[in-house]
Amino acid sequence: MTADQQTLHDAHVMVVGCGALGNEVLKNLVLMGVGHLVVVDFDRVEASNLTRSILFRRSDVGRPKTEVVSQRLKELNPGSSITMLTMGLPKAADVLREGIYRGADEGILLTDRALGGADTLATSYSLAQAIRKIGDYDVILCGRQAIDGDTAQVGPQVAEKLGLPQITYMEEILSCGEGRIVCRRHVDGGAETVEAPLPILLTVNGSAAPCRCRNVKRVMANKRREFTVWGAADIDADPMQIGKAGSPTNVKAVKNIVFKAKETRVLSASDEDICNLINELKESNTI
């Protein structure tokens, strides 16, 4: 094993978000020989994720993305170690368990009443603290945005709190080695190639690849598995920066607004109709 190969083998990489582009990143990291991967994602595979998928399959729709990705990466590199991290209620352990069924090695659940009600600022702080506790890493992968708030803020905020460079809307890792990473990222109307130093945080664009099914043996062996559980105290969190206390924004109400068609009129091309319309617009101060 060369010195570069040993460096890759010893590397610890956290991937937050494993959609379609995250799939590509994870696949390339494993194929390059990165020895330790931590995969973080809160969403499940949807049918829309399958269009550009490399690790997901149609039979995996509805399953947690972390589970599917973990299993596929283990297949690509049997020597790799995959740890999942999720933040949520205690029942979120079910997501970790599903990941274990599909090939992940370990799972960490970040849960605490004090973390509840967090907006993007408090959420990113909590995740950053957990990442610090996990230890060394070279690449952190995040999803582009959650399916509820759609803010696309958490990933960049985590990078800021960790003091890392970031590449957003990343579509593919083209190369990674010797302390540098080259990625293709989506931009309006096309794509651009970006090179940056490691360690780095990447936010992964949109759709995901198909997932694998549960492994029956792993289901039987891990259906009562307990996971590492961290609370606010375990990640050395400042009480004023987590949960509602650390959230400058709050959701007061959610409303479903239906836009109704307004009254319409069909005008002819006659001079009279055109003049009448102009007069109406003037009277209403529209023009």
Image: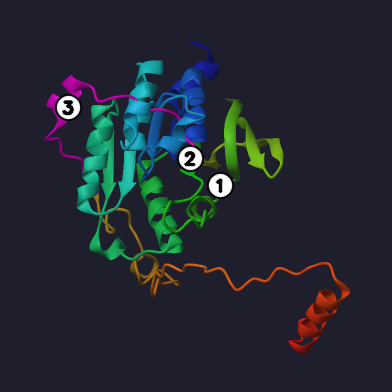
Q: Is residue 25 left or right of residue 236?
A: right
Q: Percent from the top left, x then y, of residue 205?
A: 54, 41
What's the colour scheme? Answer: rainbow
Which SS class for mark 1?
loop
Q: Which residue is mark 3?
A: 219
Q: Which residue is mark 2?
A: 140
Image quadrant occupied by the C terminus: bottom right
Is residue 150 highlighted in magenta? no
Q: Which residue is mark 1?
A: 164
Res. 192 image quadrant: top right
The residues bearing labels 3 and 1 have C-alpha atoms spaced at a distance of 37 Å
The residues bearing labels 3 and 2 have C-alpha atoms spaced at a distance of 28 Å
- Secondary structure mostly seen in magenta is loop
> Which of the two labelled residues, at mark 3 and mark 1, occupies the earlier sequence position?
1
**Foreground pick, 60 / 108:** 60
Vertical position of residue 226 compared to residue 89: above or below: above
- In the rendered structure, are the residues bearing label 3 and label 1 in contact, judged by CB atoms less than 8 Å apart? no
- In the rendered structure, are the residues bearing label 2 and label 1 in contact, judged by CB atoms less than 8 Å apart? yes
Q: Percent from the top left, x then y, of residue 139?
A: 50, 36
Chain part drawn in magenta: 207-229
- Tag 1: Cα neighbours inside 10 Å, few (<14), some, or many (≥20)? some
> Which of the two labelled residues, at mark 3 and mark 2, occupies the earlier sequence position?
2
> Which of the two labelled residues, at mark 2 and mark 1, occupies the earlier sequence position?
2
Vertical position of residue 12 compared to residue 145: above or below: above
- In the rendered structure, are the residues bearing label 3 and label 2 in contact, judged by CB atoms less than 8 Å apart? no
- The amino acid marked with disc number 1 is Leu
The residues bearing labels 2 and 1 have C-alpha atoms spaced at a distance of 10 Å
Res. 136 image quadrant: top left
Pair 3/2: label in front? 3
Which SS class for mark 2?
strand
Q: Percent from the top left, x then y, of residue 215?
A: 23, 22
